[in-house]
Image: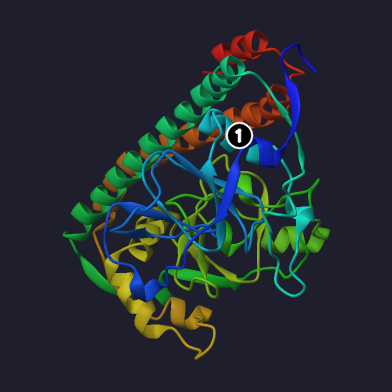
């Protein structure tokens, strides 16, 4: 352990408290994030905890931290840091990122993290100046990733604007079913690799691009690979879990097969593929999907329903002009997102080494300067 670093119990480093109940019907529009143990929590008009702050999953995603730069509402599915005891709050966030608490499940039926169970977890604690330096190194990577993501989102908005402008030039109304072929996806098991990516609904519905970094791998047979491999220009639409959500496969995307909860739409004329994809992300199609969903318990759309709508198609020359603008936009988005994957990989490798003191901050700074 580096000179000046000490070993402490978690309860000596931070004071943790359970969050507060806030059912969906009680949430009112406001600026304060509701931090839950899940992916999204929404916002509320009250933020009882002053930021910056940290929560960790209590009911699911045990120990997974979330950060809030400002005031926030810690949901009762989380534990939140009530007192940082003089430590850098951002370093505490990284501490929980680097500490696996999933094994401290205290629930007999539902997973549950009890703060008393984790109070004696041993923690290596650097002096405050070292905490600040660690946060600066990791923060530079986080800031670059955030900037790239923001720019990619802006580019996605530009592409949507191009679609809206083109959609105002209808040439003919055509059933979507006459423009595409449909195919259901593969039922198989995910793995940690090696093999092609296994694209699922959860990998396509959070951002206006495929979340390739979250997709696991799989081991299809040769016949399955030939039948279910994705190709550039493919449109993939969720039929269950989040029916109607669509994704587009770009040139250069990873080798992948698509899962059974997805339906592939392959444009009979590849020139139309990108325009059709944007139509599937339009408010018009979202309204159609909402009304067309079947199932009283789990909403779903089969392939016939997914393509059971008429759409206004512009003239071919107009679509070609659209492609000339939007395909380069998507290429620029992909460049940014690929860089983010590299930066995230660097960050993930630096995190445990910095938090343990095995890597000096000066050495990490040199690596980061090259990366960013």
Residue 212 is at least partly visible in this image: no
In this view of the protein, which residue sits in the foreground, 57 or 170? 57
Task: Give coordinates of residue 371: x percent, y percent.
Answer: 57, 18
The answer to whether 287 appears left or right of 57 in the picture is left
Q: Quadrant of the N terminus?
A: top right
The residue that appears at 59% across and 44% down in the rendered structure is 15
In this view of the protein, which residue sits in the foreground, 52 or 192? 52
In this view of the protein, which residue sits in the foreground, 150 or 116? 116
The residue that appears at 51% across and 25% down in the rendered structure is 139
Task: Give coordinates of residue 133: x percent, y percent.
Answer: 56, 16
Q: Quadrant of residue 13?
A: top right
The answer to whether 184 appears left or right of 53 in the picture is right
Task: Give coordinates of residue 134: x percent, y percent.
Answer: 59, 21
Q: Quadrant of residue 198?
A: bottom right
**Residue placed furthest toward the bottom:** 296
Which residue is the site of mark 1? 94
Q: Is residue 298 above or below residue 100?
A: below
Residue 193 is at least partly visible in this image: yes
The residue that appears at 68% across and 25% down in the rendered structure is 350
Task: Give coordinates of residue 323: x percent, y percent.
Answer: 34, 45
Q: Element at badge 1?
A: helix
Q: Quadrant of residue 177?
A: bottom left
Local crowd size for mark 1, using a 10 Å CA cut-off: few (<14), some (14–19), many (≥20): many
The answer to whether 184 appears left or right of 251 in the picture is right
């Amino acid at each position: 352990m580096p000179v000046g670093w000490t070993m402490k119990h978690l309860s000596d480093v931070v004071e943790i408290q359970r969050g507060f109940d806030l059912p969906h019907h009680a949430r009112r529009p406001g600026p304060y994030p509701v931090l839950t143990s899940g992916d999204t929590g929404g916002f509320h008009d009250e933020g009882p905890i002053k930021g910056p702050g940290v929560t960790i999953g209590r009911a699911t995603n045990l120990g997974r931290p979330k950060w809030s730069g400002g005031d926030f509402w810690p949901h009762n599915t989380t534990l939140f840091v009530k007192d940082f005891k003089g430590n850098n709050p951002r370093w505490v966030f990284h501490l929980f990122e680097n500490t696996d608490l999933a094994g401290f499940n205290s629930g007999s039926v539902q997973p549950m993290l009890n703060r008393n169970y984790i109070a004696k977890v041993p923690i290596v604690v650097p002096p405050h100046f070292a905490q600040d330096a660690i946060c600066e190194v990791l923060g530079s990577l986080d800031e670059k990733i955030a900037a790239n993501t923001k720019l990619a989102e802006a580019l996605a908005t530009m592409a949507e604007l191009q679609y809206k402008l083109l959609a105002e030039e209808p040439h003919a109304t055509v059933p979507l079913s006459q423009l595409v072929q449909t195919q259901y996806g593969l039922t198989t098991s995910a793995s940690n690799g090696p093999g092609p990516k296994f694209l699922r609904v959860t990998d396509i519905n959070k951002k206006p691009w495929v979340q390739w970094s979250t997709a696991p791998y799989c081991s299809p047979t040769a016949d399955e690979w030939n039948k279910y491999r994705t190709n550039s220009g493919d449109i993939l639409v969720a039929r269950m879990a989040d029916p109607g959500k669509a994704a587009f496969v770009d040139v250069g995307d990873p080798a992948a097969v698509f899962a059974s909860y997805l339906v592939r739409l392959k444009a009979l004329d590849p020139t139309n593929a990108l325009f059709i994809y944007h139509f599937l992300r339009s408010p018009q199609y979202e309204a159609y999907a909402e009304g067309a969903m079947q199932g009283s318990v789990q909403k779903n759309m089969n392939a016939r329903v997914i393509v059971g709508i008429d759409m206004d198609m512009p003239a071919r020359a107009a679509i070609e002009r659209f492609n000339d603008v939007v395909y380069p936009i998507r290429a620029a988005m992909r460049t940014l997102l690929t860089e983010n994957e590299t930066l995230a990989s660097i960050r993930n490798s630096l995190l445990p080494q910095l938090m343990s003191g095995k890597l000096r901050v000066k050495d990490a700074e040199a690596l980061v300067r090259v990366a960013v």
